[in-house]
Image (tube, rainbow, N blue to C red):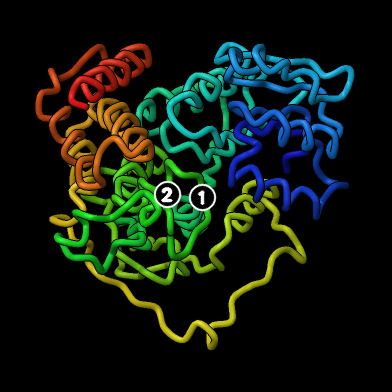
Amino acid sequence: MIHRITIFGATGSIGDSALKVIRRNRDKFEIVGISARSNFAKLAGIAREFGVKKVAIADRRKFAAEQGEKFFPAGTVFFLGVEGNCELAADGQADAILMAISGTEGILPTMVAIGARKTILLASKEVLVAAGEFAMAAAKQFGVQILPIDSEHNAIFQCLAGSNKFIKRVILTASGGPFRDHSREQLLVVTVEDALRHPNWVMGPKITVDSATMMNKGFEMIEAKWLFGLAPEQISTVVHPESIAHSFVEFCDGSLLGQLAPRSMEHPIAHCLFYPSREEGGSRGLDLCEIGKLTFAEPNRELFPCLGLGETCLREGGNLAAALLGANEVAVEAFLARKIAYVDIGRIICEVLSTYPGERECTLRGALETIAHARIHAQALL
C-alpha cells in the first residue's frame, strides 16, 4: 500500500476527492508534495492542513507577479514551472504520485516519476493519449505500476483482477453529457453555461466540455489500448445515462463483468491508494432498489463527431492522437472564452487532423512536437 504521496493538480476536482479520502485515513498516508497551476490560496490551505513543505507552481509568472510565497507557511520549498513539476516528481521522499494535471503539462512529470520508480496513480488522460507507448514501455522497464483513477479504466482494472488472459473486449460507459438528448438544431445554440452543466459529475471546465462533446470518451478508448494492451477492435463504448456501471469486460466465454459504484471519484481514488487492499468504512455504497434500473444505448456519432475522431486516432495510431490532443485543447479554450460556438470544436479538430502530415518522429519528443504543431494549426483556424 502507498504511504507517502505527492499530488499533482491538488486544487482541482480530483485533488479535492483525493484529499477527502486521505482525511478519512490520516494515520495511513502522508502528503509530501503538492502542485497546482496558479491557485496559490487554496494550495497554501492544503499545505497548512497537511503540513506539506514541498510545493510546485506551474505558472511561475503569476507566482512572481503576485508574490505567491506570502500565502504559504515559512519553510515551504517551491518548485516553479514545468521544470519544477518534473523536479518534484523525481523527489525521493514520495512512494507514489497522483497525476491529476489537466492538459498536456502532466506528460513530462509523469515520465520523470516513472524513471524515478514511483507508483503512478493516473488521472490525467493526456499522458497515455499522447505518450501511452512510451509511458507503458518505461513503466515495464523500471518495474513501475500505473494504477488508473479514471472511473472507467479503474472499473476495467478491477474486473480484470490482474489478468487479461481471456479478455475478448472492454466496453467503456459514457454518461452522454448534458446534450445526449439534443437535436442537431439544439446543438447549434448551446452556451458555455449549458456545456458546463453536467448531469452527473462535478469536474473542471476542460474535462466537462470534453464530456459534452464526447471527446473525453475518445480519449479514454485510446487510454484503454495502452493500459490493458488491447487492439482497437477490442474497445467499444455505450451511453449509460445513470453513470452507475463504470465499465464492462467481456471474456472469451461470453461472460460479462461490470463494476458498479456511486457517482463519486472517491471510490476509484481510494481503490488505487489502498491497492491491493481496500478502504474499510469508506464512502456510502449503492442501493440497487433506489437506483431502480440501468439503461444503455449506442452513441450518436453524427451528433458527437469528436467521439468518431477519437476512434480514428485509436485505429491509426502513431502521433495522430497527439495532434488530436493539441487541436482539442485550443478549440476547448476558445469555446470557454466564447470565441467559437460549441459545434466549432469538432470542426476545428477535424480540419487539423485532415491536413495532418502523417507520422512524425515516433518518440516522446515527436509526440510533444506534434501537440505543439496541432495547437499552432488550430490557433490559425480560429
Q: Residue at x 88, y 17 (%)?
A: 75
Question: Which of the image's four quarters has the C terminus?
Answer: top left
Tell me whether circle 2 and circle 1 mark residues in contact (CB < 8 Å). Answer: yes
Crowd class of label 2 (few under 14; some 14 to 19; many from 20; radius 10 Å)? many
Residue 372, which numbered label? none
Q: Please provide percent x and percent y for residue 148.
A: 52, 44
Q: Nearer the viewer, residue 212 or 109?
A: 212
Numbered-mark total: 2
Q: Nearer the viewer, residue 224 or 266?
A: 266
Q: Please provide percent x and percent y for residue 269.
A: 62, 50
Q: Please provide percent x and percent y for residue 190.
A: 28, 55
Name the residue beneath numbered marker 2.
208
Quadrant of the rendered image containing residue 185: bottom left
Q: Residue at x 20, y 62 (%)?
A: 186
Q: Please provide percent x and percent y for residue 20.
A: 73, 52
Question: Which of the image's four quarters has the N terminus?
Answer: top right
Q: Residue at x 64, y 42 (%)?
A: 15
N-terminal label among 2 and 1: 1
SS at circle 1: loop
SS at circle 2: helix
Residue 286 vertical position relative to residue 298 in the rendered view, above or below: below
Q: Amino acid at mark 2?
A: Thr
Residue 181 vertical position relative to residue 17 in the rendered view, above or below: below
* Cα distance in 3D space between marks 2 and 1: 6 Å
Crowd class of label 1 (few under 14; some 14 to 19; many from 20; radius 10 Å)? some
Residue 289 vertical position relative to residue 122 in the rendered view, above or below: below
Name the residue beneath numbered marker 1.
203
Q: Residue at x 46, y 86 (%)?
A: 292
Q: Amino acid at mark 1?
A: Met
